[in-house]
Amino acid sequence: MSKFENAYKTIGEVVKIIGLKSKSNSVSPTHTIRYWEKEFKQIKPKILNGNRRYYDKKNIDLIKKVHFLLKDQGMTIKGVKKILNNMDTLKLDENLNESIKAHNIRNKLVKISNIIKSLKNNK
C-alpha cells in the first residue's frame, strides 16, 4: 500500500471515493457523511483547524460499508447500527458485499422469470 493510499482524505475526497451523489443539487453529498457521523459513533474523523474533517483508511472503509448497507441493500439506519455494533462477529468485507449483490440479482432474475412464465401461461 502506498503512502498516498494511507494519507488522510478530506470529506470531499471521501464523497468521490464512495461515489455519493445528492438527489438535489441544493444539498451537498458531504452533508450525508456528516449526518452518518452523528448516527454511527464508529465513524470518527480527525477534526483539525477550521473544523475540517480528515478520514483515515479505517473510517473510509467504514463509510463504504454504511453506504453499501443503506444505499445498495436498502437497510435502515437502525439495522446498520446493529450490524456495526456486532462487527466483530459479522465481518463485512468486499467478497461478502459482492456475494450479497450477486444473491440479490439472482433473486430478482428468478422473480422476473416467474412473472414471464405466468404471463405466457395467461395467453
Image (cartoon, rainbow, N blue to C red):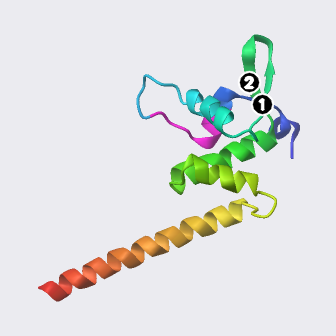
Q: Is residue 40 above or below residue 89?
A: above
Q: Is residue 33 visible?
A: yes
Residues shaded magenta: 14-22
Q: Would residue 120 be found to the left or right of residue 3 on screen?
A: left
- Please tell me which residue is depicted at 84% across the width and 38% down the height of the picture: 6
Q: Indicate the secondary structure of the residue bearing disc 1.
A: loop
The residue carrying pointer 2 sits among few (fewer than 14), some (14 to 19) or many (20 or more) residues within 10 Å by Cα, namely some
Q: 41 or 20, which is in the foreground?
A: 41
x, y percent for residue 90: 75, 63
Element type at marker 2? strand
- Amino acid type assigned to the residue bearing label 2 in the image: Arg
Residue 43, given in percent of the width and then of the height, sits at 74, 38
Kindly check if marks 2 and 1 are in contact, taking CB atoms under 8 A apart as contact: yes
105 lies above or below 19: below
Q: Residue placed at 56% from the left, 65% from the top?
A: 101
Give me the disc on residue 45.
1
Q: Which residue is labeled 2 in the image?
A: 53
Q: Position of residue 2 (x, y in %)?
A: 86, 42
Residue 17 is a magenta residue:
yes
Q: Residue furthest bottom?
A: 121
Q: Quadrant of residue 91?
A: bottom right
Q: Is residue 107 above or below residue 121?
A: above
**Residue 7: mark:** none
Query: In the visual, does 44 lie left or right of 21?
Result: right
Residue 27 or 84: which is nearer the viewer? Answer: 84
- View extreme (top): residue: 50
